């Protein structure tokens, strides 16, 4: 949710900290801060409510130090304010801490520390850590031991970086549920909550495991467990391109990522289609054909757009493999004591691989002996590591808070899984070939849709100031409607409702009026006539309709029409979704919204 950066080396830490925070800002952006120290001793601290740019403006030229930590926040405990921004200091201003996650027993610890004389200056749970660590750093106690002792009293999740003004030769970092990655430089070291902050400086990284800590010095690092046993970690090389973290000439990351979809879909498909047997090869499943034949049910778990992509995935699996499949919000599943069945395959979906609710759902399934696959974008992320196998999306980094290219690649990954499953069961070679060719055609078809961006911008401008918007679709079109509504509300703040088209007459038809336009998914499939009837019902109530489909409905049934290329019916939802991304984007721009960093949201939701 929040972003952490840290630097230690011969240079001034501040420029790296500020640039790193700007790159992590998509993780949280209500306040930001930096703290540095050096040989001259003492901690310099600046933190402000607002964006990283506000922080940069508040940092004076003399703010220098060779060891530093920084943070960009998404508020959980306490409102966004200067005082609640990280880093947090102890009363002697010797220890500075930045923290992602939630300390669940913060109130209890706060009361004890206050009774011992600690004076709290913020409402955050994190400040507890600064006082706790300070209480443990005594003469002859190493900083890492003081941090370990403090964390031993903490219940909750954390990724932290700790600075000690009296030991400027090191930073101590720790991970439990919130990622921390070390970056190895030339006589300098970096740490961050996400590689995006590091790739300009180094490609050699070490991902800490949960329950692991590290002492980071300019010339290297040492990792160890909470009970002080040394661990041995080999660096890996980051293969994402540096320019993935730039807008590359587009006005926003979101628009860039929408336009990257032909390439990201190609990468998701790359090397996985088998034309000879009309199937898909998915090397990471760790399940052979015999084991897959024993699967009787598929349960897909994800949050937000990942859950909607899972709904599309469930339909693909049912249609191609004829195995009952269902998608459920991981955030609900984990709390309802779910029945875990031996012949059910659980599939966790997450772009970031960090979403706490999804991770907790995976852990619940595994604790009860279930088998979980991951459909994940971020290689080596917590969810990917927790799963028994899976499919990496290879969509490339997604920076904008709203998911677009990862969403599309997730659905493509499910199409591959469904094809693979189907061909193990009863999907005919002819049907397999039909799906293989349709998948190969997708990148060019997406390009065709993207060419309509300008026309869609015109429509978005016309409808952006509506009181709300209705999104409807039948069966395959319903998850498209849900994702379309999610995208619009998330980035434009226009209220949007998604309904199955078949349900309209059971209640929501009462809402239809000229003030509530409807985006209707009307693919040219076996349900076209039913969908056209629904359009007639909306028009009869003076509703305005934007139809998205494969052929223009009669003029009396739709006010506007967006046409997309026809795929196979099972894959049509993928293409129908792309104009809805553009519609949401252009509506948000027309309304002057902060497209890449919508209010109240963050890219990775690493808290409950
Ligand atoms: C997508 O536009 C949203 N920002 C959000 O719903 C997101 O899909 C959800 O939080 C899950 O994230 P994940 O894929 O990283 O797990």
Image (cartoon, rainbow, N blue to C red):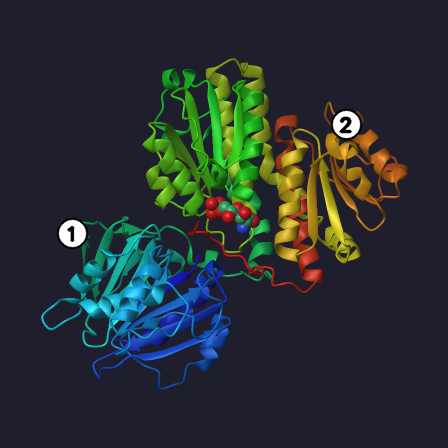
Query: Residue at 84% across / 38% down in the picture?
Result: 538
> Could you tell whether 505 is left or right of 350 in the image?
right
Question: Residue 206: x, y in percent?
Answer: 27, 53
**Near-viewer residue (563 or 61):** 61
Identify the residue under disc 1.
Answer: 227
Is 405 situated above or below 24? above
**Residue 258 location (% of width, % of height):** 59, 50
Instruction: Identify the mark nearer the N-term, 2 or 1.
Output: 1
Q: Is residue 205 visible?
A: no
Taking 388 as reference, is 489 left or right? right
Asked if one can make out residue 140 in the rendered structure from this viewpoint, the answer is yes
**Dot 1: element:** loop
Where residue 320 appears, as percent x and y from the top left, is: 56, 21
Where on the picture, by quarter, is residue 471?
top right
Q: In this view, does 228 lie to the left or right of 316?
A: left
Rendered position, 334 above or below 172: above
Specify the quadrant of the image occupied by residue 144.
bottom left
Can you give x and y, in whole percent of width and height, for residue 445 in the image? 64, 38
Tags 2 and 1 touching, CB below 8 Å: no
Report the front residue among 173 and 558: 173
Q: Nearer the viewer, residue 312 or 49?
A: 49
Residue that mark 2 sits on = 528
Which element carries disc 2, helix, strand or loop?
helix
Q: Residues within 10 Å of mark 2 (few under 14, many from 20)?
A: some
2 vs 1, front mark: 1
Label 1 packing within 10 angstroms: few (<14), some (14-19), many (20+)? few
Place residue 9 in its image quadrant: bottom left
Tell which residue pokes out farthest to the left in this image.
140
The residue sitting at 43% across, 66% down in the picture is 72
């Amino acid at each position: 949710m929040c972003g952490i950066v840290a630097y230690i080396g011969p240079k001034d830490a501040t420029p790296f900290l500020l640039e790193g925070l700007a790159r992590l800002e998509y993780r949280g952006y209500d306040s930001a801060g930096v703290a540095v120290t050096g040989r001259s001793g003492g901690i310099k601290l600046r933190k402000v409510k607002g964006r990283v740019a506000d922080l940069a403006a508040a940092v004076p030229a003399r703010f220098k130090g060779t060891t530093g930590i920084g943070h960009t926040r998404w508020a959980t405990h306490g409102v966004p304010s200067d005082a609640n921004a990280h880093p947090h200091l102890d009363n002697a201003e010797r220890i500075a801490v930045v923290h992602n996650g939630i300390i669940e027993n913060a109130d209890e610890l706060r009361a004890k520390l206050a009774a011992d004389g600690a004076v709290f200056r913020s409402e955050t749970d994190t400040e507890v850590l600064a006082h706790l660590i300070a209480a443990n750093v005594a003469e002859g106690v190493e900083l890492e031991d003081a941090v370990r002792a403090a964390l031993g009293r903490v219940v909750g999740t954390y990724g932290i970086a700790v600075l000690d003004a009296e030991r400027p030769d090191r930073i101590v970092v720790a991970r439990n549920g919130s990622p921390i990655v070390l970056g190895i430089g030339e006589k300098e070291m970096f740490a961050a909550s996400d590689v995006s902050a590091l790739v300009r400086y180094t490609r050699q990284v070490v991902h800490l495991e949960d329950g692991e800590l590290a002492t980071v010095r300019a010339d290297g690092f040492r990792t160890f467990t909470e009970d002080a046993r040394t661990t041995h970690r080999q660096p890996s090389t980051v293969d994402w391109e540096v320019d993935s973290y730039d807008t590359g000439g587009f006005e926003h990351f979101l628009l860039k990522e929408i336009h990257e979809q032909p390439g990201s879909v190609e990468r998701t498909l790359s090397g996985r289609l088998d034309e000879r047997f009309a199937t898909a090869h998915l090397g990471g499943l760790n399940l052979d054909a015999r084991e897959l034949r024993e699967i009787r049910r598929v349960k897909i778990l994800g949050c937000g757009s990942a859950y909607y992509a899972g709904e599309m995935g469930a339909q693909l699996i049912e249609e191609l493999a004829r195995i009952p499949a269902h998608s459920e919000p991981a955030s609900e599943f984990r709390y309802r004591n779910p029945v875990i069945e031996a012949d059910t395959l659980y599939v966790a979906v997450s772009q970031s691989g960090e979403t706490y609710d999804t991770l907790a759902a995976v852990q619940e399934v595994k604790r009860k002996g279930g088998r979980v696959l991951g459909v994940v974008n971020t290689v080596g992320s917590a969810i990917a590591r927790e799963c028994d196998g899976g499919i990496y999306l290879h969509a490339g980094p997604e920076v904008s808070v709203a998911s677009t290219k990862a969403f599309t690649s997730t659905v493509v990954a499910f199409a591959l899984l469904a094809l693979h499953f189907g061909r193990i069961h009863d999907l005919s070679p002819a049907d397999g070939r039909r799906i293989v060719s349709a998948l190969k055609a997708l990148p060019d078809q997406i390009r065709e849709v993207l060419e309509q961006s300008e026309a869609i911008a015109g429509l978005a401008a016309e409808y952006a100031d509506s009181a709300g918007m209705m999104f409807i679709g039948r069966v395959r079109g319903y998850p498209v409607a849900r994702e379309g509504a999610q995208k619009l509300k998330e980035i434009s703040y226009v209220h949007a409702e998604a309904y199955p088209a078949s349900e309209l007459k059971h209640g929501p038809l009462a809402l239809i009026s000229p003030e509530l336009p409807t985006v209707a998914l009307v693919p040219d499939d076996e349900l076209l006539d039913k969908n056209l009837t629904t359009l007639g019902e909306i028009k009869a109530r003076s509703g305005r309709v934007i139809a998205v489909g494969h052929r223009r409905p009669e003029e009396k049934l739709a006010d506007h029409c967006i046409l997309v290329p026809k795929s196979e019916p099972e894959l049509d939802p993928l293409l129908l979704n792309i104009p809805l991304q553009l519609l949401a984007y252009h509506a948000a721009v027309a309304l002057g919204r902060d497209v890449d960093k919508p209010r109240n949201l963050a890219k990775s939701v690493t808290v409950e």
